[in-house]
Amino acid sequence: RIMRPDDANIAGNVHGGTILKMIEEAGAIISTRHCNSQAGEPCVAALARVERTDFLSPVCIGEVANVSAEITYTSRHSVEVQVNVMSENILTGAKKVTNKATLWYVPLSLKNVNKVLEVPPIQYTRKEQEDEGKKRYEEQKLDRLETKQRNGDVIFPVINPEPHTVGYSQSSLIHLVGPSDCTLLGFVHGGVTMKLMDEVAGIVAARHCKTNIVTASVDAINFHEKIKKGSVITISGRMTFTSNKSMEIEVFVDADPFVDESRERYRAVSAFFTYVSLSKDGKPLPVPQLLTETEDEKRRFEEGKGRYLQTKAKRQAQTQQAAQQ
Amino acid sequence: RIMRPDDANIAGNVHGGTILKMIEEAGAIISTRHCNSQAGEPCVAALARVERTDFLSPVCIGEVANVSAEITYTSRHSVEVQVNVMSENILTGAKKVTNKATLWYVPLSLKNVNKVLEVPPIQYTRKEQEDEGKKRYEEQKLDRLETKQRNGDVIFPVINPEPHTVGYSQSSLIHLVGPSDCTLLGFVHGGVTMKLMDEVAGIVAARHCKTNIVTASVDAINFHEKIKKGSVITISGRMTFTSNKSMEIEVFVDADPFVDESRERYRAVSAFFTYVSLSKDGKPLPVPQLLTETEDEKRRFEEGKGRYLQTKAKRQAQTQQAAQQ
Amino acid sequence: RIMRPDDANIAGNVHGGTILKMIEEAGAIISTRHCNSQAGEPCVAALARVERTDFLSPVCIGEVANVSAEITYTSRHSVEVQVNVMSENILTGAKKVTNKATLWYVPLSLKNVNKVLEVPPIQYTRKEQEDEGKKRYEEQKLDRLETKQRNGDVIFPVINPEPHTVGYSQSSLIHLVGPSDCTLLGFVHGGVTMKLMDEVAGIVAARHCKTNIVTASVDAINFHEKIKKGSVITISGRMTFTSNKSMEIEVFVDADPFVDESRERYRAVSAFFTYVSLSKDGKPLPVPQLLTETEDEKRRFEEGKGRYLQTKAKRQAQTQQAAQQ
């Protein structure tokens, strides 16, 4: 579809959240279709996890985003989908790869939302494809267990914060979950949640550096808990780390199912977004260093640095590997 | 894309206007891409005309609409696009053809919006394709000239109208044209206009028969005049004719470019929509006969009857032809 | 226009904010049209004030809202517009008055946004109309001066608040001002701001009483400061007062023009919303009493009680007056 002014920031760059939402919609369609391809209970595929996603190049207003999706692995109860986004300038004809994303879905019964159904197996053209898929499946399973622990933190506001401190740029928004945010089962689409998360992360980044900012990447996001129609969700973001030219922002989603009195507020999702600041001609600018004050802030900064160095090392390894091939 | 609650009426049937908007977006993308495929002045394709479009089967919430578009003819200054819409129930896998629409676009220069550029010719696989296209091109050109006259009428409100009279169901809405309604050139997308027209026609039909109604067809629509960002548009609808099981509604679009002092209010588009009333299990219901009061109403009723009989005859001829093949 | 699922809460009642947005759009159109009716500099009418507005009856999904607007007074630099909203159930034909609202607009030059232009005078059919309008004009002018002082307060979060305290239900959201939120001049439509304010107020009310809630009224809102495209706005709400069957919520809007480094964050608007809680058959329910803890909360509760008693007295006077006529 064509990218509109509302999909973009003032500088004309399309929000990463808009792209994430399109990716998730494509993934949900292909996996729901696949899981219903054999006779049996009808089901809807629910997003369980998105792997780390890099935004390779910014998309602009007026460009057309082409989204294609393919099922690359199936376990007994889950589907792995690979989604590619190409942006095309229909005036010049220029095309470029914007994103390659990997998503995991789980089929939930339309009759009983707590029942996970079985996934029809796909055919692999080569045995290695199945083995590699199985390896990816085991890895993400471990990671999902791990992040389940990482929750519980809350963001408290700061009075008269200094510029470039954590308190200065932290932000949160509430959103009432309406019908068009939801699947047939009455639960929020993963893509809607990711779009809101990117919105908060973008505001944190813009408050910190007061320039044109764009999403560079999102780390893996796990969706442990469903969010029901009518819930109020609070999405909070705080900066955790800055390198010379990038900012890492942690984003939490808390759900408040206040129409369902039996449930307390709970942490539904959390993730790290990385943003860069761009000059008018689209080049990365230096970002102001984050000022950490408390022990927790310093610890989170060091953890962020660890993630940053790890990603950097991985990317260099890939570049070298590619050069050798 | 997946059809959402907001795309549909209370009975879950997707508005014809939502489908028309998707069709137009696909047409605009493919023809803008084609017209920029050769080096030269960059341009944006503007909708000039939509041929008569039948809605073959209603689409429901939760279904996925697949839109495909193909360029079928090019004249020196215009492009004919064929757009097909298939709706797919991703739970059952059932697919059906929803629409086949034909649209004409004209490339306008990005630098000078009043300059129509030349269209790169397409290659035809058979000579007959080109000849048939040329015939369609000549026919629509004539029709466009004709409808240019048909304007000027206004809808006046009626005090305490009787049920089933024209005055009882007539309706109008105003819309302020915002940035996300517009193309890169700052003019309203044809699809946005058609969606609003269908919305008004639907309200007229529902007021008349007070049941669940769906769009059955739209006659050819010509877009004589562009509508600029910041204009206020008034969309008015009145019933012109009823058969046993269908209602014809005439819809006008008037634009009021009130920030641009040099222009008076003008009629931008007009068209006839045909609606049917559906029972709970989706079968067509009889509709109350339209009560005509004035001479003009009686004349319009007869004209509507003419269009209805002509369409019916055409359809019968096609069915016979198909049976003979 | 037809009310959609996304315009409403889970119980099917349309949000007061959706209605306020429609009212403001109608007011902006008619006053912009009037102010451009004489040759001179083109201008856009900007909302300066909305008088206290009562929601007389709830609107439901599937109903059609008819909005009509009329200019009732003009001063040298401002326009008073009366907007009426009727909701119509198009299946039964039943109509009811939903709102009567009075809005004040000021014409700003399209060329120079800080220049207020002159308003063409309207013709009054009776001399009294002009005199009454002048009286209303003077009154609102005084009120605008007064509320300019009333600002500066901030909402601080509370850790582990008890149910029914102020801290328990207070809420805030951030919103990045996008192109479709704005007028041609690049400033937020007053209606967009009011819709977001109603959204926050509604979440506060729902958190407090955990039932289906609807907007009953909004006190007069003054728009002292424009909000520019690209700003981040923070909308915060806290409960100030409860009567047996109503809740008063104070809402602030703070704008953070972070792309424009020369400006600090500023208070753009504030207002009081009154909500009621409805049972399943639409009758008002008792609401839990607000627990006040700090001195400020107790003072605000008393002030709210004052407003509540004043409004109640005014309404009784009007009812008696009407009975005597």
Image (cartoon, coloured by chain):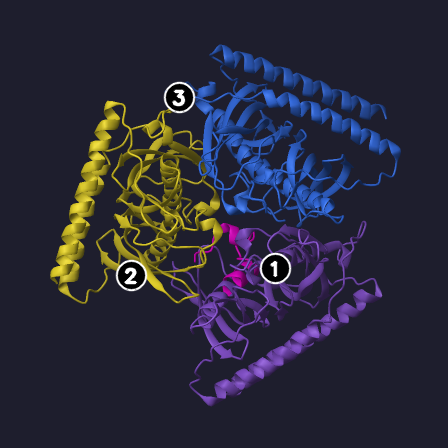
Chain colours: A yellow, B purple, C blue
- The type of residue carrying mark 3 is Ile
Q: Report the chain holding disc 1.
A: B
- The type of residue carrying mark 2 is Glu
Report the residue that reaches farthest toward the top. Answer: C295
Identify the residue shown where x is 52% and y is 62%.
B19
Q: Name which quarter of the figure residue A65 lies in.
A: bottom left
Identify the residue shown where x is 47% and y is 80%.
B121
**SS class of the residue under badge 2?**
strand
The residue singled out by tag 2 in the image is: A70
Q: Which sits earlier in the primary sequence, circle 2 or circle 3?
A: 2
Q: Quadrant of the N terminus of chain B?
A: bottom left
Q: Is the residue B44 above or below the residue C153 in the image? A: below
Choose mark 2 or mark 3, whichever is in front.
Answer: 3
Instruction: Please tell me the numbered disc located at residue C126.
Output: none
Q: Tell which of C245 and A16 is nearer to you.
A: A16
The residue singled out by tag 3 in the image is: A159
Q: Is the residue B129 above or below the residue A87 in the image? A: below
Q: Which residues are magenta?
A: B1-23
Determine contact: label 2, label 3, CB under 8 Å. Answer: no
Instruction: Please tell me the numbered disc located at residue B198.
Output: 1
- In magenta stretch: residue B235: no
Q: Tell which of A123 and A91 is nearer to you.
A: A91
Q: Report the chain holding disc 2.
A: A
**SS class of the residue under badge 1?**
helix
- The type of residue carrying mark 1 is Asp
